[in-house]
Image (cartoon, helix red, strand yellow):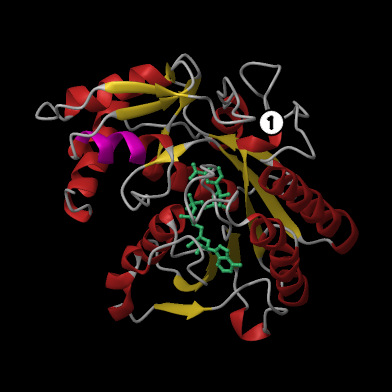
Amino acid sequence: MRALVTGGGGFIGSHLCRRLLAEGFEVTCLDNFASGMRRNIAELAETPTFRLIEIDVTAAPLPDEFRADRYFHLASPASPNPHTPRSYMALPLETALVNSVGMRHVLDLAMRNGGRVLFASTSEVYGDPQVHPQTEAYWGNVSSIGPRSCYDEAKRFGEALCMIYVRKYDVDARLIRIFNTYGPNMDPEDGRMLPNFITQALNNEPITIFGDGQYTRSLCYVQDLVSGMLAIMESGRADAAGRVYNIGNPEEHTILEYAKMVLELIPSSTSEIVYRPPVPDDPSRRRPDISRAQAELGWQPTVPLRDGMQKTITYFREVTSVR
Ligand SMILES: NC(=O)c1ccc[n+]([C@@H]2O[C@H](COP(=O)([O-])OP(=O)(O)OC[C@H]3O[C@@H](n4cnc5c(N)ncnc54)[C@H](O)[C@@H]3O)[C@@H](O)[C@H]2O)c1
């Protein structure tokens, strides 16, 4: 079986590539490293069943030499932090295009050659939700003109495009709405909450919380997420094409609790918590309802938060030089 992973050099994609290789797939990774890191997949270069093609998936239709049995479309900047160069707010046009034009190129490849498609959508399609927790049936509360719209609306359009190919062209495209995920291979400088807290704590710098710290987040360890992706992709349900699943961890904590947990797990740190103005459009709560994935796929997260955090901290210690 052959798998194509766009964005395979990124945080989640690098774990997915490893898992697919372990499952016996031949894996082709397409990445332009707009936001990913070469070191995430450097050690795979020696693996004969793995190949990396450095390519922008929006630039031109994808040639049939990339045909596969399974297509995973993950390519897209994913960090919301406007102050970092690889975030979707810093790369708004690239983000809009990779989830629309790039998505189309993957769907066209599958339409011509067969094979299943999984689109990495996001909990951000729910925007600043007015329903808690969010089920897949919730339509969301999204601003089409806000600063996050380059990402939220691009993902919503990507989902709509998949449904066009499912309904009109009989392509077997499936949708995963990924909730906040963490783990090794996250970019320490991408400005997301946990990388920020961990690098700040390791460097004994102030831990910055945007807002009052009472916003909540639910974090899923990347290994659990990848299992969820494969469960959706390999589902044999008759209605699998066009089906959407929330995948995330429903355990909810405030941002302040995460900051305190990081400090507990890095006891040598002398960092103190400081507060900065909130990020515009930042949702105050986000928590997945995963009952559909539990009932239909038998999936649920298994890695306890502290264990996942510890592994992430160990990785960050290895890759970040203390300033
Ligand atoms: N990390 C999360 O918590 C999270 C949450 C929801 C959704 N997602 C989605 O999951 C996917 C992966 O996220 P991630 O956290 O691993 O992000 P990431 O930035 O680490 O990985 C994305 C990868 O896509 C590549 N890429 C971007 N534009 C490209 C293009 N035009 N052509 C080829 N490659 C391109 C980047 O270089 C990078 O390697 C994204 O689609 C993201 O929207 C992630």
Asked whether 110 or 313 is in front, the reply is 313
Would you place residue 34 above or below residue 257 in this image?
Answer: below
Would you place residue 128 above or below residue 12 in this image?
Answer: above
Asked whether 216 or 176 is in front, the reply is 216
Check the image and name the residue furthest to the left: 268
Viewer can see residue 1: no
Which residue lies under the disc numbered 1? 127
Asked whether 82 or 183 is in front, the reply is 82
For the record, the magenta segment spans 195-201
Query: Residue drawn 16% across and 30% down?
Result: 266
Element class at badge 1: loop
Asked whether 128 or 221 is in front, the reply is 128
Residue 159, given in percent of the width and then of the height, sits at 75, 48
**For residue 198, side relative to residue 277 (left or right):** left
Viewer can see residue 38: yes
Would you place residue 38 above or below residue 260 in this image?
Answer: below
Residue 100: quadrant of the picture? bottom right
Label tally? 1
Residue 82, given in percent of the width and then of the height, sits at 54, 44
* Most frequent secondary structure within the magenta stretch: helix
Would you place residue 202 above or below residue 236 in this image?
Answer: above
Query: Residue drawn 75% across and 28% down?
Result: 140
Residue 181: quadrant of the picture? top left
Q: Residues within 10 Å of mark 1 (few under 14, many from 20)?
A: many
Q: Is residue 123 magenta?
A: no
**For residue 191, side relative to residue 289 (left or right):** left
> Please, what is the three-letter code of the amino acid marked with disc 1?
Gly
Residue 104, given in percent of the width and then of the height, sits at 76, 66
Check the image and name the residue furthest to the right: 168
Residue 245, given in percent of the width and then of the height, sits at 63, 38
